[in-house]
Amino acid sequence: MRWTRVILATGSICLIVVASVITTRYMHRRYEVQSLPSTQEEQREAPRHELARRGYIKLPTAEVRRLLTDDCSTIREPGELPGAIKNAFATLTDEKPFSLAAPGTRFNATDVIEPGLPRRLLVLGGHCENRWFIEYEQGGIGKTVALMVLRINPDQSVALVWGRQLKRPTQSLRQLRNMLNSNAFWEGPYFW
């Protein structure tokens, strides 16, 4: 009887160790995260530690309200994003190669992962002059909606301008602007 317990306990421990190794290998990212060029806003506002590395940029409320005030146009498909913006998005979300589902298509909306499907769904995207915005829904245990604003610099490098989790998804550029004007976003440091 005693040996049965010992064998069962040893077997359980071995099973836990094997499951941990498999999980660690599955979750390991094969790609190195490429840091984006820092922005003046990041240098002025963000602390020089993990938040700065991950792209947390604190903008004054007036600047947040001005992010999407220029003449803007929207896109319908992730394929309409320029390559530099796709690469920056993939880098910031730690998911390379670039993967973003088009509206109305399937994606991993829950924590049950289906291989081959993106983890994020494009809600609204577009550009205002040299600033590109991507509003997306991310699946998981709880769905989140986030907004990422990126800028293409004159030298064709890309910089993160601002990003946050939104309190609810939008349906149009007008709604997105209203949300920014009413501060309908979370101020937490991680938005993806």
Image: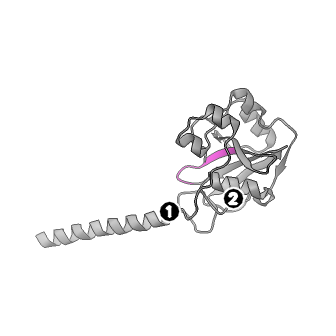
Q: Which residue: 71% across, 53% down?
A: 122
Q: In the image, what residue type sits under mark 1?
A: His
Estimate the x, y position of residue 12 in percent, counting from the top left: 28, 67
Sequence-wise first label, 1 or 2 = 1
Q: Nearer the viewer, residue 51 or 111?
A: 51
Q: Nearer the viewer, residue 136 or 52?
A: 52
Determine if the magenta segment contains residue 155. Answer: no
**Label ID, residue 28:** 1
Residue 19 sits in which quadrant?
A: bottom left
Calculate the distance from the C-alpha at mark 1 to the C-alpha at mark 2: 20 Å
- Horizontal side of 79 relative to 40 (left or right) equals right
Q: Which residues are magenta?
A: 140-148
Determine if the magenta segment contains residue 147. Answer: yes
**Label ID, residue 40:** none
Q: In the image, what residue type sits under mark 2?
A: Leu
User: What colour scheme does the image use?
Assistant: one colour
Q: Which residue: 77% across, 49% down?
A: 125
Estimate the x, y position of residue 29 in percent, counting from the top left: 54, 62
Q: Which residue: 85% across, 37% down?
A: 70
Estimate the x, y position of residue 184 in percent, counting from the top left: 67, 34
Q: Which residue is mark 2?
A: 100
Q: Residue furthest right?
A: 71
Residue 8 sits in which quadrant?
A: bottom left
